[in-house]
Amino acid sequence: MRKAIYYILVILLALSQTMTAAPAKKKSKSKKQAASAKTWKGANRNIHHVAMWGGVGYSGLVNKYDNNKFTGGVGGLIGVGYEYKYDHFILNAGPEFRIFSSADKITFPTSYDVSMIGPGYNQTKHYTFTEPMPEDHLVGQVTLPIMVGGIWNSVYFLAGMKIGYTVLGSYSQKSKISTSITDDAAYDPSWVNMANHGAINDDPYSAKGKTNYGLDIIATAEVGVNINGLLGQQWNEDNMKRRFPWHMRAGVFVDYGIKNLTPASQGSMAMVDEKAMNTRSLHVSDWANGRMNSLLVGVKFTALLQMNKPQPPKPQKPAMVLDVTDIMTNKAIAAATVEITPTEAKKPRTVKRSTNNKGRMVAKLNAGPYHLRLTHPDYIAMEHDYSHGDFGDTLTLAMQPRPDFRFYVRDAKSDSLLAAQVTFINSANEALIDSMATDAATGYGHLRLPLNTPVRIHIEAANHLALTQAVGDIGGQETYRLEPIIKKRVIILHNLFFATNKTTILPESETGLQDLYTLLAENPDIRIRITGHTDNVGSERANQKLSEGRANSVRDDLIKRGINAERIEAEGKGETQPITTNDTEEGRAQNRRVEFVIL
C-alpha cells in the first residue's frame, strides 16, 4: 500500500508538470490566442461551488502501548460541502463520513488471577494466555472538515482541521488460554483425584464487542492536480458555456488524529463458562494506556459544480501611462515621439503622442494589445509590445543614447586637414549604416552610431590612397591619415595576409585588396609595381620563389577585378631587402611583406 501511494504521488507530479507546460506551448502559436487566454481580473473572484468528494486508502489506529505491532487496514471517506474561490485562494467545508480499520498484535501480561474463597477452601484460579492476542478494529466517524489552500495553474493544495464524532466502533479478539488452580487449605491427599474444577489447557479464546471512541480532532492535508486541464481546450470551452460548469480534481490526502480518541471506561476480566473473557477492548483495558491516534492516507477525487458566473466589467477606455527615461542616467526624456498601433484591429490606425517635460505620456485607449515605437533624435529607436493586461500600471521604457563618433581626416605626409567621403559599414552583415563628407576647411566629421554593432569606416580623398579600418570606440574621437599618391614612393600593404609558406591569399585580405583596386580604378593613368619580400628562414631559392609567387597572386587578383594587366608589374626580392632584423619573430613578421610603388 505504501509503494502504491508513492507511485500515485509520482504520477500526479508528472501530470501537473505536463498541464502547466501545455498553456505555454499553445501561447507560442499566435499572439491572438495568447491574448484571448488572458481574462479580466475579476473572472477568478467570488466563485461558489457545490463540492462532492470521495477517497480510499490506507488506515489504522496508532496505539501507544509498549511493544505493540501495528498493522494497518483499508479505509475511505465520502463527503459533500461548499467551496469558495477568490483568485488563487480556496476555502472548503462540509460534512463527511469516513471509515477505517486496523489490526494490532498486543503483548500484555500473560497471566491473570481470580481468588475463590469459601467455607473450608481458599482457592486461586490462574488464567494464562498462551498466544498474542490480535485485536481488529472498525471505526466509522462523521467529521466536519474546514480546509484552506490555493490553486496555481493546474496544481492545488488544501490543509486544515476536522472535528470527528464516532458513530460506530467495534472490535474482535482471538487467542488461546490455559488455567490452573491452587488451594491454600488443601490437606487431604485424596483430593488429587478430584474433578479439575474447570481447568483448561490451550483452549481457544475469542471476544468481540462495541467500543465508543468519542470525539477526534484531526489534522488533514491534500495536494493534487486539476483534471480539467487534461480534457482539451474544446471540452473546457463547452463546459464553461453550461449553466453549471464542472471542475474536477484528483490528489492524495492524509488525515491524522492529533487529539487522541476518548477511551471508554476500563473493563476487567470475568468468569464466563469457566473461560476468562474481557469485557472491553484491550485498547482501553488495564493492559494498554487506553488512547489511540487515527490515521488515514490515500487518493481522493473531488467534483465541483460551479454555481455562479462572474459578470465581466463594462468595457472602458483605460489609460496607458508611459514614462520614458535615459538608460544611462535614468533621467526623463522630453519630446520623445511615441507611435501607438493596435495589433488586432482590422484597420489599425497609428496614434502619435509625445512625452512631456517629465518624460510622461498618457493616452486613453480601448483595452487590447498595442505595438509601441519610440523615437528621439538623440536616442536609438526602440519598440515594445503592450498588452491590455498592462493597463492601469505605469510602464517605464528606457532608451539608449546614440553615441556621437567624432573624427578628423588628415594628409599622412603634411598633416593637413582633408575633405573626404566617409562611409560607415556594419561589419557583421556588410550593411550600409550611413555616409557623409567631412568639412572641406576642418576635415572634421561626426555621426551617431548604433550600440553593440561592429562598425568599419571607409575613407576616400582625392589624390590619396583609400583607407578602411575598424572603429574601436564608437563614442570616442579618432584621427585618420591618408597616404598621398606620390610616384616612386613605396607603400606597404598592411592588410594583406597569406597562408603559411604559401602564395594563397586569405579571405581577411579583402579590405586591403579592395582599397588597392579602388586606387587603380579611380586613377586610370597610374601604373604600379608589386614586390614580394620574405624573412631569412629557409633557403634563398625557396624564399625567392615564395616572394615572386605572392606578388603574382596579388597581381592576378587585381586583374580578375577588372584592372588592365599592362598597368601592373610583379617581382620578388626574397630575403634580400629586410626592413628590420631577422633575429626576432616580430622582426621577421615585418620583413614578410608585400608592397607596391607607383611608377
Image: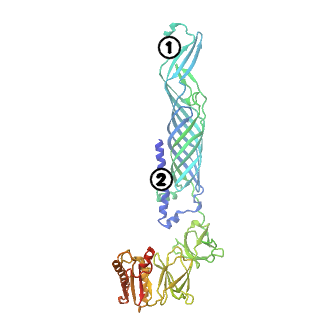
Residue at x-position 56% and y-position 85%: 444
Q: Marks 2 and 1, how far apart in space? A: 70 Å
Question: Which amino acid, mark 1?
Answer: Asn
Q: Which residue is mark 2?
A: 15
- Percent coordinates x, y for residue 369 in the rendering: 55, 69
Q: Secondary structure at mark 1?
A: loop
Q: Which residue is mark 1?
A: 196
The residue lying toward the viewer, choosing from 414 and 38, is 414
Going from N to C along the chain, the mark reached first, 2 or 1, is 2
Question: Which amino acid, mark 2?
Answer: Leu
Count of numbered labels shown in the rendering:
2
- Percent coordinates x, y for residue 483 in the rendering: 48, 86
Residue at x-position 56% and y-position 20%: 113
Q: Quadrant of residue 498?
A: bottom left
- Image position of 252 (left or right of 570): right
Q: Secondary structure at mark 2?
A: helix
Q: In the rendered image, is residue 152 in sight?
A: yes
